[in-house]
Structure formats: structure tokens, C-alpha cells
Image (cartoon, helix red, strand yellow):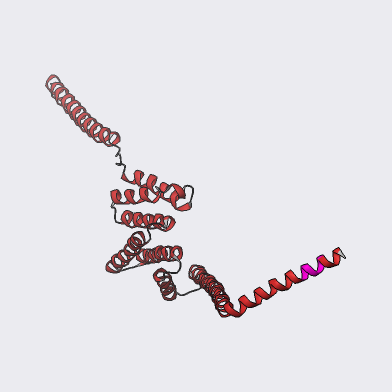
Amino acid sequence: MKSRRRHELQENVLAIEIGKVAEFLKKRGSHLATGVLLAALVLFGYVFVGRRSRGKQANLQRQWDLALSGDLKPDERVGALADLAEQDDNERIAALAGVELGYHYALQSLAAKEGSERVALAERAGQCYLLTIEKFPKQELAVAKAYYGIGKLRESVRQFKAAAEAYRKAKSFADLAGQPVTRLAEVALRELTVLQAPVRMATTAPATQPTSAPATRPASAPATRPASRPATQAATRPAEKKTAP
């Protein structure tokens, strides 16, 4: 009897609690439904924006890979790099695209036949490098590559001091130690030191040969032969003619 009575009491308590929940839902049901709806909308928006962002990043990465693949024509490649450099959804790709665009113009300037065209292309390359440094100072890899490109441009016009300064900036990033761009900058800086060293000319050999040969041969040959033969012949032959009669 006691267990049955206890069970009935538990059922009554449960019924009371369910009644309270039902009454609460009647009064606050609309508010709860609105809250659940808002939470669902927020969650849906988060998932949608995340998927859209990931899709956009993947699309940018595909465009970047295509621009570097070599499958595009020169004009198409320039257009693709320019679009990537101007977009603001991926700062890393934008900075690297600006540097790559500068490399493209620099290579074209080396192949240009006209001097004016060569200068114009080199200036465009320099503008791409400087814009990358100014616009993306936190993208250290792109900035280091831009400084290396500037160094090559200055070296090509024999501005060795400015080139050395650019190479030193390219290899100054501690986080890029061991990266190809820093190694290239170190090699370029060493080669630049060799280019600026004065060239020593050989001066000993030309100084001895011209002074010795002309000084001895002309002085000895004319001095001995004309002095001996005419002197002996003129002194002996007249003396023999006087004693003969």
C-alpha cells in the first residue's frame, strides 16, 4: 500500500509539473517560437556565409594557380594578375599577384628592343613593387619579393647603392629566414660587391718590353759595323800603293 500510495503521489506531482509547463507555453509560446526562429536564422546565416567564403577563397586559389601555370597568353595573364591584385577577399593572394605582375613587366623590359619601351616597362614593374610594399606591409613574403625585384631593376641601370639597399631589405625579415627570396637576395648582394670592386690592370709587362728592346738594338748595330769596316780599309790600301814603286 505504501508503494502504491508513493507511486500515486509521484504521478500527481508529474501531472502538476506538466500542467505548469503547458500553462507557461500558452502564455509564452509565441515568444519562444520567435526566439527559436531567430536562432535558426542566425545559424543558417553563419553556415551560408561560411560556405560562401570558403567557395570564394577556393575560386581565388584556382585563379591564382591558373595565372602561374603558364597556360594563359601574356595579355590574359596580365589581366588575371591585375584582377587578383585588386581584389580584397584574400590579402595574401592580392600582394603576391602584385609582385608577380611586376616580375612580368620586368622580364618584358629585358626583352624589349626599343630603349623607350624598355624604360617604360621597367617603370611599370617598379610601380607594381612599390604599390605592393605600400598596400600590404604585413605580407612579408610579398614585400621581400618586391624589394628583391626593385634591387634587380636598380642593378640593371648600375645604381648599385640603391640595389644593395633593396637587397638588404629583402633579406631583413626574420620570419623568412631560409626562404628562397632571402637566399637570392644574399647571393645578389655578394655578386653586387664583386661588381663594384675596382679592376686591377697589369702594368709591369708593358713597362719593360718597350724600354729594353729599342734601347739596345739600334744603339749597338749602327755603332760597331760602320765604325770598323770603313776605318780599316781606308788605312791599309793607300799605304801599300806608296811602297810598291
Residue 158 to residue 230: above or below: below
* In the image: residue 26, left or right of residue 192: right
Task: In this rendered view, identify the residue nearer to me: 241 or 160.
Answer: 160
* In the image: residue 209, left or right of residue 104: left
The image quarter in which residue 134 lies: bottom left
Task: In this rendered view, identify the residue nearer to me: 165 or 233.
Answer: 165
Residue 142 to residue 54: above or below: above
Residue 44 horizontal/vertical position (percent) = 56, 75
Residue 10, magenta (yes or no): yes
Residue 125 horizontal/vertical position (percent) = 34, 64
Task: In this rendered view, identify the residue nearer to me: 208 or 235.
Answer: 208
Residue 229 horizontal/vertical position (percent) = 20, 27
* In the image: residue 203, left or right of residue 7: left
Quick one: quadrant of the C terminus?
Answer: top left
Q: Which residues fall within the magenta stretch?
A: 6-11
In the image as oriented, which residue stretches furthest toward the top? Answer: 243
The image quarter in which residue 9 lies: bottom right
In the image as oriented, which residue stretches furthest toward the right? Answer: 1
Q: Which residue corresponds to the image point at 40% horizontal and 54% vertical from the top-left?
A: 144
Q: Which residue corresponds to the image point at 31% horizontal and 42% vertical from the top-left?
A: 197
Considering the whole magenta stretch, tell me its main secondary structure: helix
Residue 123, magenta (yes or no): no
